[in-house]
Image: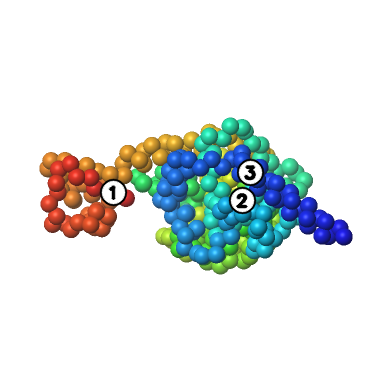
C-alpha cells in the first residue's frame, strides 16, 4: 500500500506546487515577449523550437489530465522537481518568469559542509565573461578554455534535465540542482550522462569540445535561476576554482542586466537612412556586413537608398 500511497501523495504535491507556481510567478505580459526576443539573440530559444516532442506543459489547466510521471527522467521523490514545477528536457528556460520584478530575496545554499558541496566544472583560463557581446548579443555564461576530450564536471548535486545536441550549444548538458540553481555545460564533444541521472558535485558530465556554434574548443558554462541567467562570477571565483561564499543571495538586482540590455537593444535594431549614406558606411558604423544588410532588408548593393527608410540591422 505504501508505494502507491506515496506515489499518489507525491503527485498531489507536484500538482499543488505547479498551481502555486502558476499563480504566484507567471505573469504573461509584454516584458515576457521582450525577454524572449533577447533570448533569441543567443539562440537559446532555438533549443525549444528545433526539436519536437518537448515535454513542457504549456497549459496549467491540463495538468489534471497529464500523467506527469510519464515525463522522461521524472522522479516524484526527487525534491528538485517540486521546486520548479515544470520538467522540460528540451528548453533551457521553459519557466518564462520575469525575475527583473522579483520582490523577495532568495537565499541559496552553495556549500553547507555536509551534503551540499561545490566542484569546479573545469580548471582553465577564462576566455570570455558574462556580459554584452558585440552590439546585439548577450553572453549569458562564461567561457573556459579547454582541449577536446577534457573532463567537464558537475558543479553541484542534482538531476540531469537536458542532455542532447543543439545546433547552437552543440552537445549540451543542463543540470537542475538541489540548491535551486540550474547549470549549463555546452559545446561538449561527448555526453556522459542521460536525462534523469542523479549527479553529485564533481561527477563527469561530458567531454569538452568544439560542437555547435563555437570557435575553438572551450566550455560555455551558465548558471541560471528559474530560467534566467545570473553572472557565474557572482558565486564562483574562476581563477581559483572556488566559491565566492557558502551562500548566494538572489534578488532582482541579479537581473538588472536585462533592463539595460533591452533598452539599448530596442533602440538600435533599426537604422534610418540619412542623406549621404552608403550601404558600406551604414554597415561599418553598425558593425554588420553589407551582405547581412542586403539579406535582412531584401535589397542588393545596387539598390537606391531612400532617405528616411528604416533598415533592419539584426
Ligand atoms: Zn560562451
What residue is rendered at 62% in x and 33% in y?
A: 105
Across and down, in percent, residue 98 comes to: 52, 40
Q: Residue furthest right?
A: 1
Q: Nearer the viewer, residue 197 or 80?
A: 80
The answer to whether the residues at label 2 and label 1 have Cβ atoms under 8 Å apart is no
Residue labelled 1 has its Cβ within 8 Å of some atom of ligand 1: no
Choose mark 3 or mark 2, whichever is in front: 2
What residue is rendered at 54% in x and 40% in y?
A: 27
What residue is rendered at 24% in x and 43% in y?
A: 271
Query: Residue 277's image quarter?
Result: top left
Q: Is residue 295 left or right of residue 246?
A: left
Q: Residues within 10 Å of mark 1 (few under 14, many from 20)?
A: many
Across and down, in percent, residue 164 comes to: 55, 64
Q: CA distance from mark 2 to mark 1?
A: 40 Å
Q: Nearer the viewer, residue 239 or 303?
A: 303
Q: Nearer the viewer, residue 235 or 288?
A: 288
- Where disc 2 sits, the SS reads helix
- Disc sitting over residue 61 in the figure: 2
Residue that badge 1 annotates: 313
What residue is rendered at 14% in x and 43% in y?
A: 307
The answer to whether the residues at label 3 and label 2 have Cβ atoms under 8 Å apart is no
Across and down, in percent, residue 230 comes to: 54, 43
- Color encoding of the figure: rainbow
Q: Residues within 10 Å of mark 3 (few under 14, many from 20)?
A: some
Q: Which quadrant: the N terminus?
A: bottom right
Residue labelled 3 has its Cβ within 8 Å of some atom of ligand 1: no
- Where disc 3 sits, the SS reads helix
Residue that badge 3 annotates: 21
Amino acid at each position: 500500500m505504501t508505494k502507491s500511497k506515496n506515489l499518489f501523495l507525491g503527485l498531489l504535491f507536484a500538482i499543488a506546487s505547479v498551481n502555486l507556481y502558476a499563480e504566484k510567478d507567471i505573469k504573461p505580459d509584454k516584458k515576457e515577449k521582450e525577454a524572449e526576443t533577447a533570448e533569441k539573440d543567443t539562440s537559446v530559444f532555438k533549443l525549444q523550437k528545433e526539436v519536437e516532442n518537448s515535454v513542457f506543459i504549456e497549459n496549467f489547466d491540463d495538468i489534471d489530465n497529464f500523467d506527469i510521471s510519464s515525463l522522461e527522467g521524472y522522479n516524484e521523490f526527487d525534491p528538485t522537481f517540486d521546486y520548479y514545477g515544470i520538467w522540460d528536457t528540451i528548453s533551457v528556460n521553459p519557466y518564462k518568469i520575469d525575475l527583473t520584478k522579483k520582490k523577495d530575496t532568495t537565499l541559496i545554499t552553495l556549500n553547507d559542509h555536509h551534503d551540499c558541496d561545490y566542484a569546479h566544472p573545469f580548471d582553465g583560463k577564462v576566455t570570455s565573461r558574462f556580459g554584452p557581446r558585440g552590439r546585439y548579443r548577450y553572453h549569458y555564461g562564461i567561457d573556459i578554455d579547454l582541449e577536446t576530450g577534457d573532463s567537464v564536471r558537475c558543479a553541484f548535486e542534482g538531476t540531469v534535465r537536458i542532455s542532447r545536441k543543439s545546433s547552437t550549444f552543440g552537445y549540451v548538458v543542463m543540470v537542475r540542482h538541489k540548491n535551486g540553481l540550474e547549470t549549463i555545460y555546452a559545446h561538449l564533444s561527448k555526453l556522459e550522462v542521460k536525462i534523469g541521472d542523479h549527479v553529485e558535485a564533481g561527477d563527469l558530465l561530458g567531454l569538452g569540445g568544439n560542437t555547435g556554434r563555437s570557435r575553438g574548443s572551450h566550455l560555455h558554462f551558465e548558471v541560471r535561476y528559474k530560467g534566467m541567467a545570473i553572472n557565474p562570477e557572482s558565486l564562483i571565483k574562476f581563477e581559483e576554482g572556488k566559491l565566492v561564499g557558502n551562500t548566494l543571495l538572489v534578488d532582482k538586482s541579479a537581473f538588472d542586466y536585462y533592463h539595460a540590455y533591452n533598452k539599448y537593444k530596442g533602440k538600435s535594431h533599426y537604422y534610418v537612412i540619412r542623406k549621404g549614406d552608403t550601404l558600406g558606411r551604414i554597415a561599418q558604423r553598425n558593425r554588420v556586413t553589407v551582405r547581412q544588410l542586403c539579406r535582412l532588408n531584401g535589397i542588393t548593393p545596387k539598390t537606391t537608398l531612400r532617405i528616411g527608410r528604416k533598415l533592419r540591422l539584426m
